[in-house]
Image (tube, helix red, strand yellow):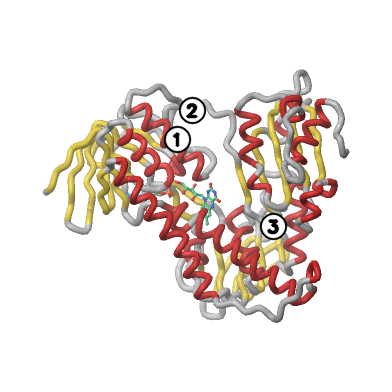
Amino acid sequence: MTELRCSLLVIGGGPGGYICASRAARLGVDTILVEGRRVGGTCLNVGCIPSKALIHAAELYHDAVRQAGEGMQGISVSAPSLDFGQTQDWKQGVVDRLCSGVDGLLEKSGVKTLTGWARFRDGKTVEVEGETGPVIVRAENIVIATGSRPVELPGLPFGGRILDSTGALALEEPPKRLAVIGAGYIGLELGTAFAKLGSEVTMIEAADAILPQYDEKLTRRVRRQLDALGIALKLETKVTGWDELDGKLTLESGETSDTLEADRVLVTVGRQPAVDGLGLGELSLRRQGEFVEIDDRCQTSMRGVYAIGDVTPGLMLAHRAMAQGEIVADVVAGEPNAWDRACVPAVCFTDPEIVSVGLLPSEAEGARVSEFSFRANGRALTLDRAEGFVRLVARESDHVILGVQAVGPGVSELVSGFALAIEAGLRAEDVAGTIHAHPTLSEAFQESALAVASMANHG
Ligand code: FAD
């Protein structure tokens, strides 16, 4: 059996793993990365990137349909048509381009990449089941960056008409009738995209609200848009059965029971760490449920074994995985680094988008909260999307910014500025005193800060 040795072995080539491996190699650490599928992980192949590409294409098509109907801004087009095969090819082209970029980055950084599935033999040894037979890798340090997988519902195993997000992103045609179970961000993003592509969408959610982690004020506009798109939303409703032959879901809400016919059912009820078959039983790692527990240097309870990304407790987001990957690369290379980030921005690419950084008003008792509406923002009006607001949460005593949330068109592009303000410990006065270009959506951030610091110019 082939045997390899290295200083650092990274298991999983998603955003956590590939950033960790390439940075470590550039810092002079002899690094091997093993990936069972394709580098880029969930994010590039079947997550962030293809979903945002689909959302964009759906938005373009939906706009064209609206323009054909209403002739917005005096522009009218004749009935648009959709060649979904071409849409999918374009989406795949974006994915392929980014994945090749990661291949190139790893190569340029000097990372040795192995294709195959890794399994721990002990805390320093991993067996990789590759295309050309098994390989043993002995490493001084090992990073678990194996990501996550979708949770199945009892009685609705993935397969046939029951899809996970990967299956939904690979569909050859938008389904005529699509049921989406779970109104978290993934379900809402994909459900909305398919509605814009012409599917008749029903969303089913067991809780009494969509995106239950956010307050109603933040989610209200998304609910309105679901209505406007004709998406039926069934809250406080549980799916209790599925008849694959007839394509019928059984739904229960309180005392009442109902059925719903669907050509496809997308299940987006959460994700869990992907640790099956990894041989974690050979190690004595402290766990939090399925998650691997880590300290502020992403070190597990075993010396020399690290974990990053979706396998660790916390927000399952690509940029958190990447930040953790950087930390581990530095630590293994002997550079000082530890998790000391003040915030992890979260974005829902819903319609309209919702972003949140730092504390919500409900998490910051006694804080000063100010809001500036996009209805009074020139740029939002020129985009014909004057809806939503920016909300700032500041400490009462000194106006240090503790949190920022926004809902509105394109607010995903504002969120890094919000995070910078929190990370740098800025006060509302600092944001208020920074000239924000006009006309931009970002002026709403300055106005919300002005309202705390002195008085809003347009409030
Ligand atoms: P992953 O990206 O999951 O990568 C893990 C890799 O490890 C995989 O390639 C897997 O094949 C490999 N692997 C697993 N086990 C083994 C093994 N034993 N041996 C070898 N290789 C192994 N996040 C955002 O921040 N923004 C978004 O807009 C966003 N949108 C999303 C949309 C969808 C539809 C989904 C599903 C997810 C989305 N996410 C988004 C979440 C994001 O994709 C994840 O948080 C991120 O990919 C986690 O990175 P990771 O490195 O921890 O793991």
Residue, x 48% and y 68% (percent of image)?
A: 170
- Whether pointer 1 and pointer 2 mark residues with C-beta atoms closer than 8 Å, the reply is yes
N-terminal label among 1 and 2: 1
* Rendered view: 169 above or below 385: below
CA distance separating discs 3 and 1 = 30 Å
Disc 1 Cβ-to-ligand 1 distance below 8 Å: no
Residue, x 73% and y 40% (percent of image)?
A: 437
Three-letter amino acid code of the residue under disc 1? Gln
Q: Residues within 10 Å of mark 1 (few under 14, many from 20)?
A: many
Three-letter amino acid code of the residue under disc 2? Trp
In the rendered structure, the answer to whether residue 309 lies left or right of residue 447 reads left
Tag 1 secondary structure: helix
- Whether pointer 2 and pointer 3 mark residues with C-beta atoms closer than 8 Å, the reply is no
* Rendered view: 401 above or below 38: above
In the rendered structure, the answer to whether residue 30 lies left or right of residue 202 reads left
Three-letter amino acid code of the residue under disc 3? Asp
Residue 269, position as x, y percentages in the image: 56, 55
Residue hosting label 2: 339
CA distance separating discs 2 and 3 = 32 Å
Residue, x 31% and y 47% (percent of image)?
A: 278
Tag 2 secondary structure: loop
Q: Is residue 290 visible?
A: no
Residue hosting label 1: 324
In the rendered structure, the answer to whether residue 458 lies left or right of residue 291 reads right
Q: Nearer the viewer, residue 119 or 62?
A: 62
CA distance separating discs 1 and 2 = 7 Å
Residue hosting label 3: 351
User: Which quarter of the figure is the C terminus placed in?
Assistant: top right
N-terminal label among 3 and 1: 1
Q: Nearer the viewer, residue 351 or 278?
A: 351
Tag 3 secondary structure: loop
Residue 136, position as x, y percentages in the image: 18, 44
